[in-house]
């Protein structure tokens, strides 16, 4: 997932997107959950970029991927 670290997402000025954690669902292997600082800041083009990179790196060709972005709860 080195490409993700080098390609920062487009964001609103003053509101950078941080990805804290990525999990693959235990039973549904085509579902990935991203823990981010604000799920509303995820641009559709960055979602597509993430999906394409996951598909390429982990051989999910022909499989419908579901990416879920959850905002991290503030403590």
Image (cartoon, rainbow, N blue to C red):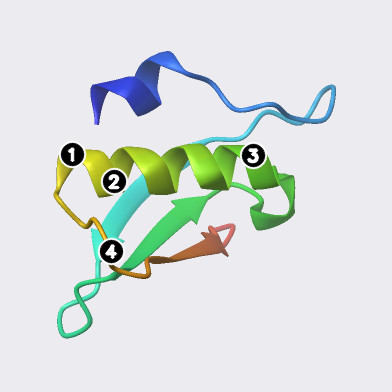
- Does residue 8 appear left or right of residue 57 in this picture? right
* Mark 4 touches mark 1? (CB < 8 Å): no
Mark 2 lies on a secondary structure that is helix
Quarter of the image for the C terminus: give it: bottom right
For residue 62, which numbered disc appears in the image? 4
CA gap, disc 4 and disc 1:
13 Å
Report the residue that reaches farthest toward the front: 62
CA gap, disc 2 and disc 4:
12 Å
User: How dense is the environment of label 4, judged by Cα within 10 Å: few (below 14), some, or many (20 and up)?
Assistant: few
In front: mark 4 or mark 1?
4
* Mark 4 touches mark 3? (CB < 8 Å): no
Mark 3 lies on a secondary structure that is helix
Ranked by sequence position, the earlier of labels 4 and 3 is 3
- Identify the image quadrant of residue 2: top left
- Identify the image quadrant of residue 67: bottom left
Residue at horizontal 69%, vertical 42%?
43
Residue nearer the viewer, 61 or 67: 61
CA gap, disc 2 and disc 1:
5 Å
| Residue marked by disc 3 | 45
* Mark 2 touches mark 1? (CB < 8 Å): yes
Mark 1 lies on a secondary structure that is helix
Residue nearer the viewer, 67 or 13: 67
For residue 54, which numbered disc appears in the image? 2
Report the residue that reaches farthest toward the bottom: 27
Is 25 located above or below residue 40 in the figure?
A: below
Residue 42 visible in the shown view? no
Mark 4 lies on a secondary structure that is loop
Quarter of the image for the N terminus: give it: top left
* Mark 3 touches mark 1? (CB < 8 Å): no
Residue at horizontal 38%, vertical 64%?
33
Ranked by sequence position, the earlier of labels 4 and 1 is 1
């Amino acid at each position: 997932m080195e490409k993700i670290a080098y390609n920062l997402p487009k964001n609103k000025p003053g509101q950078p997107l941080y990805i804290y954690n990525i999990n693959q669902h235990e039973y549904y292997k085509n579902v990935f959950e991203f823990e981010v600082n604000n799920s509303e800041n995820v641009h559709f083009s960055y979602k597509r970029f993430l999906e394409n990179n996951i598909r390429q790196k982990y051989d999910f060709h022909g499989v419908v991927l579901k990416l879920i972005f959850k905002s991290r709860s503030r403590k």
